[in-house]
Image (spheres, rainbow, N blue to C red):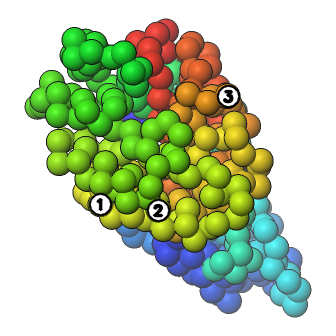
Amino acid sequence: MMEKQTISREVTEELCRKAVEMRRYSYVPYSHFHVGAALLSEDGRIFTGCNVENAGYPACTCAERTAFAKAVSEGAISFSAIAISGGPEDGELQYCPPCGVCRQVMSEFCGGDFLIYLAKAPDDYETYTLDDLMPKRFTPAHLLKDRGGTVPKKDCEEASMTAERTDISKMIDHTLLKASAEQADIRKLCAEARTHGFASVCVNSCYAKLAAEELEGTDVKTCCVVGFPLGAMAARAKAFEARCAVEDGAAEIDMVINVGALKEGRDDYVREEIRAVVESAKPAIVKVIIETCLLTDDEKRKACELSEQAGAAFVKTSTGFSTGGANAHDVALMKKAVGGRLKVKAAGGIHTPDEARALIEAGADRIGASNGVALLG
Ligand SMILES: [Zn+2]
């Protein structure tokens, strides 16, 4: 599946710090260009590497490939992220991108969401995905897919799949938030979600209990909106609504931020309100609806930053009840702003498989839609 993991800022900074440090071991008598790398495996181990040059130039090895070779030779085969740091011996560090050969090596082991940090310092790095740096890549699946071969890793399908071939059902929040929704509609929504194995059903909090009962014994989560759809109610009312929903069975909370407070720069208010909902929703995760159609790009980035500081799990584009829904520009902007540390949910106006795919390709981890079944194509 395309469900992506979240990497904390601490881990990202640790990777970047190790990549910078590893440069001291670079063996580079010819280029004098020192590169260090730190590779995070899915089991949480970090493998480091430096570049190792050779008088026979083709025998040179890059820092990234050194790290991959070390990792694979110690049993790691699935990876989440790599930090790379490079620069000349006596010069400043650069945002040093991996060479083509290293990108190919990444394609062997990593999916499109594999994160690549180009680090100048632990807190100064650019974030890319493998999809960003190598969108159309040759992978093990090309050799093995149609020949009855076995792909030599458990999640190679994920590694090589484009969104086009991915079963997106596990990414869909099947949603019914209309004021006129009745219990029978909620039951039907849950039945469809069970049939198709959706990630969740997304309902108003009055239906948390009913949805949770309907979904008992399945992997489908109950997701409730809070402070919906305007986000303008008292902060403590949002926190209380979240608590009620979780007590009734919600495992995920989609809250709306206070848009006006964000726009006038009351960052503390916005952050603390999100934090209050995050705290009262535990152990449920919180997605923060920032209502992109009402925000400038700078405000969208600020909303993402505050959501991260407040401990949210996702940022989400839209309620679907305002002047606009999700688009690829906003999803990509939000994805970049949260750098893989939070996930991104696209919602609002998503009606066709093509629209869903475009948003997934832009970086969406979750799709909210009132007709999830139509998105399966
Ligand atoms: Zn390389």
x and y percentages locating residue 355 in the rendered image: 62, 19
Residue type at tag 3: Thr
Left or right of 339? Residue 376 is left
Left or right: 274 as drawn, with respect to 246 = right
Q: Nearer the viewer, residue 312 or 89?
A: 312
Residue at the right extreme?
Answer: 91
**Figure quadrant of the N terminus:** top left
Q: Is residue 218 visible?
A: no
Earlier along the polypeptide chain: callout 1 or callout 2?
2
Number of numbered discs overlaid on the protein picture = 3
Residue shown at 39% from the left, 43% from the top:
226
Mark 2 — residue?
273
Q: Residue drawn at (64%, 66%), measured in percent from left and top? A: 266
Q: Label 2 near label 1: C-beta < 8 Å? A: no
Find the residue positioned furthest to the front: 234
Marks 1 and 3 sit apart, C-alpha to C-alpha, by: 30 Å
**Residue 86: x, y in percent?**
76, 75
**First reached walking from the N terminus: tag 1 or tag 3:** 1
Tell me which corner region of the image, top left, top right, bottom left or bottom right, holds residue 267. Answer: bottom right
Q: Is residue 80 above or below residue 365?
A: below
**The residue under label 2 is which amino acid type?**
Glu
Residue 280 tag number = 1
Q: Residue 323 shows which numbered tag?
A: 3
